[in-house]
Amino acid sequence: MSLDLANYEERARQAVALFWATRMGARIRQAQKGVLDVGDRAAVTAGKNMDGFVALVKAVVEKNGLSESEIFSGAELERRQRQVTLPGFYRPVKDWDLLVVHRERLVAALEFKSQIGPSFGNNFNNRCEEAIGTATDLWVAYREGAFGDSPRPFLGYLMLLEDAARSRSPVQVKSDHFAVFREFEGASYAARYEILCRKLVQERLYEAATLLLSPRDEEVNGAYGEMSEMTGLKRLVTGLAGHVAEVAALG
């Protein structure tokens, strides 16, 4: 089976460039209005930051056999397709960033997240708990028949992290009663996110979990880096393309 990876590297650079450009644009617009949010919240509340990654995944799905009408996202660019709610087990529903539904069967569900400085520690635990909890909830709901007779769907997770001195610097960790796992000792926030993504896949919570790092000034070139092959973008794109192609071939 020949897979089409939709020129994903170039699309990823475009997505990263859009991420930084929209963040900067949101801050400028709010500053001009005199209502600048605290810290970088102004850019976060713009709601468009990860739209480029939605477009990338959408292209992969379409080029491997499923139609645009079967892709649903919360992207600002595609509001007409905003039907992204899935039932949960521990909670009634959860909105995902992108869903693929073919013939009333759940094919794929993906989440796109980001984290920038200057304080990388503020949201790290929340991001971990969200990623773990979202997948755990879906898989129990799946086990209990929430998605009918759907075969096991493809779950994907992507984190875009600012590549900065503070995200790369070692961080001390304290545990009052028991020792932490060795891989966390002195690990930077970038390393912690890489560990998270790797373990999300190892524990089969997600089929692929990607960590991309990009410096703040890449709103033109969209340069990004990766920390390992296992948590790289190609693994996510290839896995999704193969899953979609198989579903399309089966009809």
Image: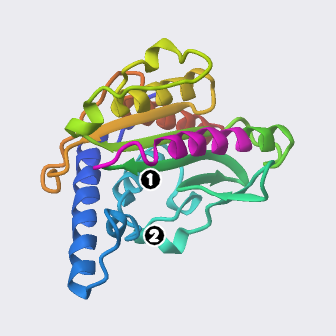
What type of secondary structure mainly makes up the magenta span? Answer: helix
Q: From which residue to which does the magenta span run?
A: 118-138
Whether residue 3 is visible, yes or no, is no
Pinpoint residue 97: horizontal percent, then vertical percent: 53, 56
SS type, badge 2 = helix
Amino acid type at mark 2: Glu
> Sequence-wise, which precedes: disc 2 or disc 1?
1
Q: Is residue 4 left or right of residue 7?
A: right
Find disc 2 in the rendering and name its residue.
78
Q: Is residue 53 left or right of residue 225?
A: right
Pinpoint residue 185: horizontal percent, then vertical percent: 42, 18
Q: Is residue 88 left or right of residue 249?
A: right
In the picture, the disc for residue 132 is none
In the image, 189 versus 225, the foreground residue is 189
SS type, badge 1 = helix
Extreme-right residue of the structure: 144
At horizontal 28% and vertical 49% (from top left) the residue drawn is 118
**Protein image colouring:** rainbow
Is residue 234 magenta-colored? no
